[in-house]
Image: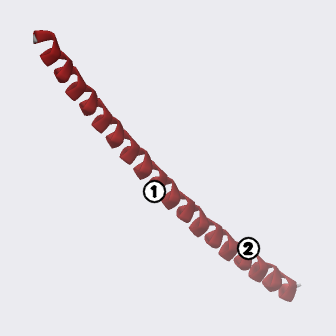
Amino acid sequence: MGYEGKNIGDKDKNTAYKDKNTGDEDKHTADKDKNTIYADKNIIYEDKNTGTDGKNTGDEAYNFGRD
């Protein structure tokens, strides 16, 4: 009888570990969301670079006018 009670306790311990693993999965989902934010940040930098190209084109036109 005593051993049966111990086995029931072990099963409850295993359930606790399963809950911990579920928490880890949630953490991974948060990391994926963070990566999505970085991808958006990169798009903003690309737009900024496009603006810089436009400025260079304006400088070339200005230099052409001076010649």
Q: Is mark 2 on a helix, strand or loop?
A: helix
What percent of the width, then of the height, locates residue 29?
Answer: 43, 50
Residue closest to the far front = 1
**Image side of residue 36 versus residue 55, left or right:** left
Q: Which residue is drawn at 70% across and 78% down?
A: 55
- Quadrant, the C terminus: bottom right
Q: Position of residue 10 (x, y in %)?
A: 22, 20
Number of marks drawn:
2
Would you place residue 14 above or below residue 44 in this image? above
Q: Which of marks 2 and 1 is in front?
A: 1
Compared with residue 7, is residue 35 higher up or lower down, i.e. above or below? below
Q: Is residue 43 above or below residue 54?
A: above
Amino acid at circle 2: Asp
The foreground one among 18 and 64 is 18
Decide: few, some or many residues near mark 1? Use Cα within 10 Å; few <14, some 14-19, many ≥20: few
**55 and 47: which one is in front?**
47
Protein image colouring: secondary structure
Q: Image point 78% across, 79% down: which residue? A: 57
**Which residue, as the protein is rendered here, is positioned at the far bottom?**
65
- Of mark 2 and mark 1, the one earlier in the sequence is 1
CA distance for labels 2 and 1: 31 Å
What number is the disc on residue 33? 1
* Residue position for label 2: 53
**At 20% across and 28% down in the image, what residue appears?**
12
Going by the picture, which residue comes out furthest to the right?
A: 67
Q: Determine whether the residue tagged by mark 1 lies in a helix, strand or loop.
A: helix
Q: Which of 47 and 61 is in front in this view?
A: 47
Q: Which amino acid does label 1 sit on?
A: Asp
Image quadrant containing the N terminus? top left
**Residue 51 coordinates in the image, percent (x, y):** 66, 76
Dot 2 and dot 1 residues touching (CB under 8 Å):
no
